[in-house]
Structure formats: structure tokens, C-alpha cells
Image: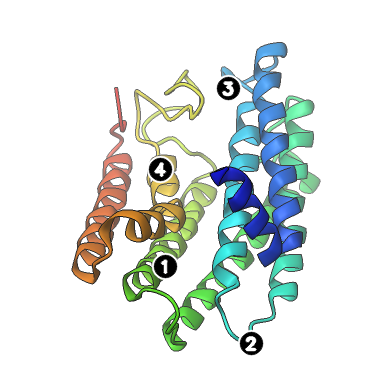
Amino acid sequence: MILTSFLSELKSRNELLFYFGLVCIVSGIVFLLLTRWSGLLLDEVNVWYKPFKFAMSIGIYCWTMAWYCSYLPQFNTKLFSWFTVVALGFEIVYIALQAAKGQRSHFNTSTPTYAALFALMGIAASAVTLYTAYVGVLFFSNTFPDLPEHYILAIRWSIIIFVIFSFEGALMGGRLSHTIGGPDGNHGIPILNWSRKFGDPRVAHFIGMHALQLLPFVAWYFLKNNIAVNILAVAYLLLATITLVQALNGKPFLR
């Protein structure tokens, strides 16, 4: 069983991030089910979609970094893992609690407490991104003779793109909105809820951050060539950039 083998290997590489990622993914499934059972809306969107997306994204990130960090020699994996659990654990718990109350987690500055917690989420996300950038530096400064060169190249590219478009989230934070040209909400693309009427920087944010999984996966199983990996990475970076420019111009990704 491929999935069983993968999970067993993942657990052996980093047990803490394996279990935390598993908790996030299971929680994400529960949050998705709650969208069918709860009619609580915020900005015309079911409140449980946001914690679903964040839980799944955080879970996938944790599993991905658990896999990659195991390649690094003399890396303090325990420190990285606990830092990630605390920082991102706070984020998903706060998002879920606010959803249960029908309140915003992001862009909520309605009270000093909510403003401080929103700022703290931004600090936590930025700190994890910087730590990920440091991991990327280690992938550039170390050699990996037991791994295919094209695979390591893809990991390096994926971390660069991830870091750029993770920090792109600050664009939305500074605006206190994830919609350009109109109000947040308004029934976007199913589940993802990207706006179909206005510009939405979340599209580029999503595409760029998930380079972390896509590029190394495609490189390992399909490309197996440095030139092909470079072409894919540049094309992927251009795609994320184009969707960001599109959003900044107030245009939707899909109408």
C-alpha cells in the first residue's frame, strides 16, 4: 500500500510533525463536514471554510517539511518542529475558535484584543516563513550525494517560491482585505471561495505556497532532468506572478 508506506516513512522521519500534521488534516475534514451541518455565515461564506483551508494547508506544510528536513545534516529538527507546532498550532486554534463564534480571525481589528491576536498571527506566520527560508539556505549550502540533483534543485526552487508568496500574505494583511475592487465574500469559487467578480490575491498566495509540494513531486516522478526542472520552476513562478498582477488590477482569476 503506497499510502501506508508513505505515512510509515514520514512518521519515522519526524514523529512530532507527522502527528501534528495528521491532527490538522483530520481537523480540516471535520471543519469541511461542519460546512454542511452549520449555516453560520460570515461575509456570505460559511464560517468553517476558512479553518478547513488553513488546517489542510498547515497539515500538508508540516508533512512536507518533515520530509525535507530529514535530508539536512546537523539540523536541529526538534527545535524547528516544536517552533512550527506552537506557531501554527496557535493560528489554527484561533481561526477555529473565531469561526465557532461567527467572528473574523483575519483583518479583525474591532477590539484591541482581536487586533493584537491578528497581529500575533501575522508574526507567527512570518516567523515560520523565515525559518523555512533558513531551511532553504541549508539546501543551497549543503551537498546531497545520495539524492538526485534534479530533485534537490526542485526543493531549492520550491522553497524560494514558497517564501516569496508566503510573504505576499502581508499584502492582504496591510489592506485588511483579501479582495481588490470589491468587498470580501460574495460567493466565490466553491470551497476555495476565491472571488469571481474582483481581484483576489489569495490565488497567487495558494499557487506560490504549494510550489513546496508540487515542484519536488513532479521532479522526482516525472522530469528527472535539471533543465526541465528549471523550466517548470520558472513557468510556475510566472503563473503565480501573473495571478498576483491580475488580482492587483482588480480582475478575478475565474469569472
Q: Of helix, strand and loop, which one carries label 4?
A: loop
C-alpha separation, residue under disc 2 versus residue under disc 4: 37 Å
Residue 206 x, y percent position in the rendering = 44, 45
User: Viewer-nearest of labels 2 and 4?
Assistant: 2
Question: Looking at numbered disc 2 in the image, what kind of residue is underneath it?
Answer: Gln
Question: Looking at numbered disc 3 in the image, what kind of residue is underneath it?
Answer: Asp
User: Viewer-nearest of labels 4 and 1?
Assistant: 1
Q: Mark 2 or mark 3, which has the lower sequence index?
A: 3
Q: Mark 4 or mark 1, which has the lower sequence index?
A: 1
The residue at 24%/70% (across/down) is 226
C-alpha separation, residue under disc 3 versus residue under disc 1: 37 Å
Viewed as shown, does residue 224 lie left or right of 31?
left
User: What label does residue 74 carry, if any?
Assistant: 2
Q: Are marks 3 and 4 in contact (CB under 8 Å)?
A: no
User: What label does residue 124 carry, if any?
Assistant: none
Residue 29 position by quadrant: top right
* Residue matched to label 3: 43
The residue at 70%/43% (across/down) is 24
* Residue matched to label 4: 201
Viewed as shown, does residue 132 lie left or right of 149?
right
C-alpha separation, residue under disc 3 versus residue under disc 4: 17 Å
User: What label does residue 155 carry, if any?
Assistant: 1
Residue 158 position by quadrant: bottom left
Residue 253 position by quadrant: top left
Estimate how packed mark 1 is, as few (under 14), some (14 to 19) or many (20 or more) residues with alpha carbons within 10 Å.
Answer: many
The residue at 70%/58% (across/down) is 11
Residue 105 x, y percent position in the rendering = 68, 39
Q: Mark 3 or mark 1, which has the lower sequence index?
A: 3
Asked if one can make out residue 92 in the rendered structure from this viewpoint, the answer is no
User: Viewer-nearest of labels 3 and 1?
Assistant: 1
